[in-house]
Image (cartoon, rainbow, N blue to C red):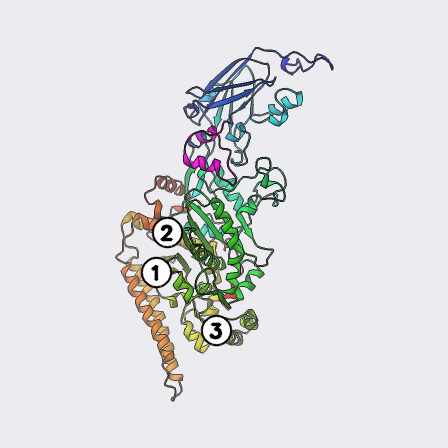
Amino acid sequence: MKQNAWTRQFFNDRMPACPLHGDWLSFCLVDETGNGKAYGGLPYTLLDSAGQQYKGRLDGSGFAKLEGIYCGPVILLMDEPYSGGDAPYRRLMSRPNYALPITELQVRAEQTCFQNKDGQRVENNPARQKADRFHQVEVSDLVRYKAHLPPPSSEARRPTHNTLRLMADLGFGPPESLFKGLALLPNQFTALEIRPLRALRPIISTDDQFCALNLYQLALMATLSYCEFGQDPPTGGGDTVSFPLNPSIGNVFVEQLSCYREAWKFDSEQVQRFYPLYEDVAYSRRFEILPFDPLLYERNQPPGEHPERIHFFNDVESGTDTQAFICHHDEVVLIAVRGTASGTDALRDADAHQVPFVEGAGKAHRGFYQGFKALYHFVLDYLSRYHIDQRVVICGHSLGGAIALLLAEGLRRIPDASYNTLLYTYGAPRAADSEFTAGARALVHHRIVNHNDPVPSVPAPWMNTTAKLWVPGAVTLFSAPTAGGLLFAAGLVRVGGSAYQHHGEQQHFMPIRLADGTHASVLWKPGCESIQEAGCNRALQLHGDMPDRDNLLRQLFQANQHFMTASYIPAAWATLRRWQQTLESQGPLVTAREFELVDSALEDMREQLRAKRRELARLRPANDRSHEHNDALNAEIDRLHTSRERLASLRWRRLDARDVYGSHAHGANLQLGLKRWFTHRENCALSQVASVPSPLHSDRGKAQILDIDAIV
């Protein structure tokens, strides 16, 4: 086959061939509609086969033509740094930690949008018909530094051969170290469709007010905290890192959301799909996982920093086994803390001894406080680098909720730091005493409790002990419940100090069975912890027993109500759907039928407490004139009455958009996000009450170790 003139490097092994002039090329940059106006005026650099450099600007239609170049392929670079005055871009380019090499091309690509709402490439771009060659390319194909940009799209119509490598092998063009950019073939018109630089990010309200949106979204983020970070290689050794493990924290934020793909799996055993509500944002406004590029950032050189070390806390060195992840965008810093998942977690949870909360007021559960202290400085370091007055949104499930509470209060207490924290916890145990709770009154904390989840009932207000006092009771609790219960109760009585007390505004999932046999949940604020605790802790303290309604042992066998994907997430999804429908219909928050069902359950509880009061009166010795027992039970009965009145008031309450969507109630991206969300069949329940979806047989939620340590 005859060799092209531009590939004949030598006449012989001593005499190089003279480079030839006379080639030309033209090219244009277009969006997915075939329009090049988005790229009009952009500066470009061309390097021909002899290393000659040509600079210019695209015309108003994104087109350029070059004539009289040296024969052979030409390298196209569009690496000019952004020179505009847009403050968010300038801030990213000049920040002290991981300043981003943002180019003019990136900014333009962020202003274009996908034709297909799922981000899939279009097949029939009009520019394709007019060009000799047509390629679908990424911004990363045309710039030198690309670690901060998304991984290339696999479905793109990319160049079929590596002309850059061919040029390097033949010895043409600039030095190989400068071989960055895209190679264009000569004497042809090439159209380059630039993939829009858009990303998806979970919509999170920054309002203090509780909203159904955050209830659901942060349940998913709290569940994601149980996953690995998923970085390959995990130590960052090498030139690049990737995040192939799905699900993993890195995979969700880098491989999926950054590439405009919706993530729905947040638990390694999850089968049922739960999609967050996503908003379509410019790529630079996504939840950021910081770039890894040892050539650009000296701190990436081994054994230095890498994404996992910056965003993922996994304390194996000091022995607390605390795990959490943190990331941010321009409005929110998100922190999610993992719950109990290991034997180390279990031993820490068990240590219910109270220690001073030196960062604020009162005393905290020592095991939870140790987890908080391990995590605290990691979070402070991240905030010192990337906090620019965003709302600090913290979430956690189970043990993670307890640590999240201490973390949120610790951050709020830092003088002059202005960390505006917002906290959502799911199934969290008590983390501190009543003095802490009083001192943290200003902290905004929405505490989500699932009916009959045993974990929020512990530590009981009377617990303050070390593990060695209760372990024998815990061991026998299942093999010999009565003996174990007595031993555990004897070992856990608090001596001195203030009682453990929950913090935050309780939101309680009350289950109901509908007429057709399906299950649903009503979310409300009962204002009565005896509902949550399934009885009277005082009765347990005094008598080693509880009212008949779902006592502690019975709750332990309903432990699936503590799991996220089997219980909390479906109930949160059902609440969001119900509130959406209520907002649309302008109906009441609680229907007459729901009130009847829940009210009946409350009356049953009250009767059980009354029966317990009569039983105690009958068993009390004749010379015992103490009314302590009756006072405790009477207080619980009164709280149930108050809760019923609160429930009754919900029959007349109407929702507004802020109840459902918080700060995004009237946001420009909300309707587009809802439209995307409703394309998924799972989110299209039409019933008046959005029933809790039935879990598949193989999807019972991630079987995290139950916080048995905290329970007992």
Residue 212's disc number:
2
Q: Amino acid at mark 1?
A: Lys
Q: Dot 3 corresponds to which residue?
A: 494
Q: At which x and y percent is residue 398?
A: 48, 59
Is 479 or 301 nearer to us in this picture?
Answer: 301
Q: Is residue 25 visible?
A: yes
| Chain-order first, disc 3 or disc 2 | 2
Q: Position of residue 436 (x, y in %)?
A: 42, 64
Q: Nearer the viewer, residue 648 or 254?
A: 254
Q: Which residues are magenta?
A: 80-107
- In the rendered image, the residue lying farthest to the front is 416
Residue 264 visible within the image: no
Q: CA distance from mark 3 to mark 2?
A: 37 Å
Q: Is residue 87 magenta?
A: yes
Question: Considering only vertical position in the picture, is 669 above or below 532?
Answer: above
Q: Secondary structure at mark 2?
A: helix
Identify the disc placed on residue 525: 1
Q: Residue at x 41, y 38 (%)?
A: 280
Q: Which mark is residue 410?
A: none
Residue occupying the far right of the picture: 13
Contact between marks 3 and 1 (CB within 8 A): the answer is no
Camera-side residue: 131 or 408? Answer: 408
Numbered disc in front, either 3 or 1:
3
Please name which of the two marks, 3 or 2, marks the residue nearer to the observer: 3
